[in-house]
Image (tube, rainbow, N blue to C red):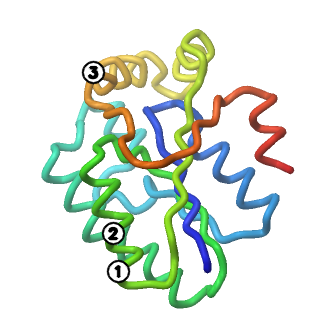
Amino acid sequence: MQQVFFFFGEAGAGKSYCAKRFAERHKLPFIEGDDFIPGPSIDERVKKFQILKPAEIQNFIHNILLPQVMSHTSLEGTDIVVSQAMYRNVDRIKFADAIQEHTAYTVRWFLIKTPLLQHIKQILSRRYGLRWFAFWLLNKPFFQKPVHHHITVLNTKTATNLLNK
């Protein structure tokens, strides 16, 4: 049975970095969820402090990201790697249920976490670092601890090396 390897976590945790390395190592297609958010890019939204509203997030996940992943499941016939924050449990559960209902794929969740000081350093090193830091602080309380089965990956050099095996 094929799998969707879904890397999720807080802003700036290293989801895309870990997911890309994993996809490259295993020669799998990679979907960067942020690339499909309608309107301005995430960097542009952060620069202008334009945070997505809950209704926009739900619309994005269910009407844009989910169809994008499903189109890959029908074309590829191989495992797929996805990176997206996916802050709320209800969205994660609905996403996994839809994938399993409409495809032969299962979703395997990877929660990417970063030690606090490293996380802050990573955020501040980005373009618009202080704005990203404010964005992270404002969104942190909304990140729900997963209630579904998942694998937690601590984003350190050691963890990255493990993902590459």
Judged left or right of residue 55, residue 45 is: right
Residue at the location (43% across, 33% down)?
Answer: 10
Name the residue nearer the viewer: 8 or 59.
8
Q: Residue furthest top?
A: 117
**In the image, residue 113 lies at what x, y percent?**
55, 29
Is 141 above or below relative to 4? above
Residue 25: % across, % down: 82, 58
Quick one: 89 or 127, which is closer to the camera?
A: 89
- Residue 86, given in percent of the width and then of the height, sits at 37, 47
Are the two marked residues, 2 and 3, in contact with CB atoms closer than 8 angstroms? no
* Residue ID at (52%, 77%): 105
Circles 1 and 3: CB atoms closer than 8 Å? no
> Looking at numbered disc 2 in the image, what kind of residue is underneath it?
Asp
Labels 1 & 2 near each other (Cβ < 8 A): yes
Q: Quadrant of the N terminus?
A: bottom right
Amino acid carrying label 3: it is: Leu
Closer to the camera: disc 2 or disc 3? 2
On the image, which quarter does residue 159 sit in?
A: top right
| Residue indicated by mark 1 | 101
Q: Is residue 49 above or below residue 33?
A: above
**Snapshot quadrant of residue 38:** bottom left
Tag 1, which secondary structure? helix
Residue identifier under label 2: 97
Ranked by sequence position, the earlier of labels 2 and 3 is 2
- Residues at marks 1 and 3, CA–CA distance in whole angstroms: 34 Å
Spatial CA distance of label 2 from label 3 is 29 Å
In the image: residue 23, left or right of residue 106: right
Residue assigned mark 3: 138
Kind of residue at disc 1 = Glu
The residue located at (40%, 48%) in the rendering is 148
Observer-nearest of 126 and 142: 142
